[in-house]
Amino acid sequence: MDEKFDAIIVGGGIAGLSAAMTLAKGNARFLLIERGEFCGAKNVSGGVLWGSDLAKLVPEYWLETGGIERFVNHRRLTFMDEQSAFSVDFKSEHFNEPPYSGVTVLRAVFDEWLAGKVQAAIDESEHPDESFLATDILVEEVLQENGKVVGIRAGEERFYADCVILAEGVNNLLTRQIGLEKEYVPVDHMGIGVKEVLKLDSKRLEDRFQLRGRSGLTNEFVGFCSEGVEGGGFLYTNSDSISLGLVLGLKDLKAKEKTPYDILNTFKEHPAVADMISGAETVEYSAHAVSTGNIKALPSELYADGVLIAGEAAHLLLNAGKAIQGMDYAMRSGILAAETVIEAKKANDYTSGMLKNYRSALENSYVLKDMRSFQDAVHLLHQPNMFGAVPNMICDFGRQFFTISGEETPKASKMMHAAIKRNASYWDLVKLGLKGARAL
Ligand SMILES: Cc1cc2nc3c(=O)[nH]c(=O)nc-3n(C[C@H](O)[C@H](O)[C@H](O)COP(=O)(O)OP(=O)(O)OC[C@H]3O[C@@H](n4cnc5c(N)ncnc54)[C@H](O)[C@@H]3O)c2cc1C
């Protein structure tokens, strides 16, 4: 087959499918190629999809029963030491109305559902027989002619297009092949995520987590959950299961000679977590590389003649402590890449001079604006005190504060002083506090 498409999208994850949906609605002819048996087969997220772009791609998606698991109306951040858990907890009816700003998803379900929506959009487009979603195919090479990307090769087959959107995810071998990313991404820019899905009957789940209807809880953890390794944990409620996992810095993991699954087992055994997952059965285990959100990991450029890079292939991700934002960044960048292709098609110009509009659109969007303004917070999270001394001190203070012992009770400031003295140095904490205040 030597047809020429307006665009070829490599990767049927969130970035690729969002680009595909936008192209279908814009009546472009495209081919999306996904190596998994179906879209979502290879993908792992915690996962909460933040932001509002899903409602643009699939209006009123919340009226459907498929696709998403729960709407997030309850958020919790927990500091842990070995025995205790001190949480900041926020629940609001403001979060309980559409359009929702956070929904929990299971990627194997969500991506396949979104692919179905893309197929429906193709069917309704002006060229229903000229755009395709092809699964179970690995793209091995990006084809170039005179320095311009002209298509891709999968096995013996070659496919050509005016523009290729690389949405291949964090393991961006094709982006590296065309020289936009260095051959090796520095190890301190990479993490590993491990996750279990634990099945729990929806009635028990709703009673246990006080969920009403399709509302859901997200709980992030710092401290003992990562056993001193840089990183943190998460627990998210799905329709009838719990997603529980960790995201850990690869460099620190190696330095401390620990394995992610051992740390996950310890996390599961912590009394606060064990109570939440009691009676739930592990039905899925997965692991996946994840970017740490360091802006230095971005490819040298996000476009070149005939090519655009979207989603985590471009290391677009932010983890500034409040949440991991990789899926919403993938969605927005996929949409912006496709919009750029539609504009390029109108102008019949796919040179880098035209495609640089994608970079400008990303710079003007919350994606690159937030990545830039919260870089200090990203770096702060990687300071050892943040997953050691600070959570220990907070739990120490909590233990004193909530103890009614029948003895004279010290003032809270005295308790805090004692907790700091036992767990950290004043000076380090002052420095950390000042940095934190500036970073957030
Ligand atoms: C444990 C964990 C927890 C996370 N939690 C969250 C969270 O709660 N919220 C959040 O927003 N983000 C989260 N993230 C990050 C988020 O999962 C990613 O940022 C997001 O999936 C990136 O989307 P993407 O479409 O760019 O890439 P992916 O979802 O990785 O999709 C890339 C697709 O390309 C396909 N592909 C790759 N190479 C080829 C090839 N050569 N040929 C054909 N197909 C190819 C892959 O099979 C895959 O389907 C988490 C990540 C991990 C690992």
Image (spheres, rainbow, N blue to C red):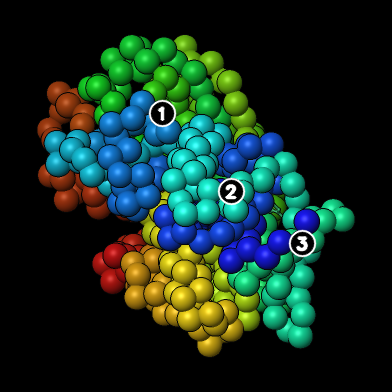
- Any mark on residue 421, and which? none
- Is 149 situated left or right of 434 in this image? right
Taking depth in this image into account, of 411 and 203 the one nearest to the observer is 203
Q: CA distance from mark 1 to mark 3?
A: 37 Å
- Any mark on residue 129, and which? 2
Taking depth in this image into account, of 294 and 386 the one nearest to the observer is 294
- Is 361 situated left or right of 127 in this image? left
**Residue at (24%, 36%) from the top-left corner?**
73
Depth check, mark 1 against mark 3: the one in front is 3
Residue picked out by circle 1:
66
Disc 1 to disc 3: CB gap under 8 Å = no
102 up-or-down from 354: above or below: above
379 up-or-down from 54: above or below: below
Asked which secondary structure carries label 3, the reply is loop
402 up-or-down from 336: above or below: above
200 up-or-down from 185: above or below: above
Residue type highlighted by circle 3: Asp
Residue picked out by circle 3:
2
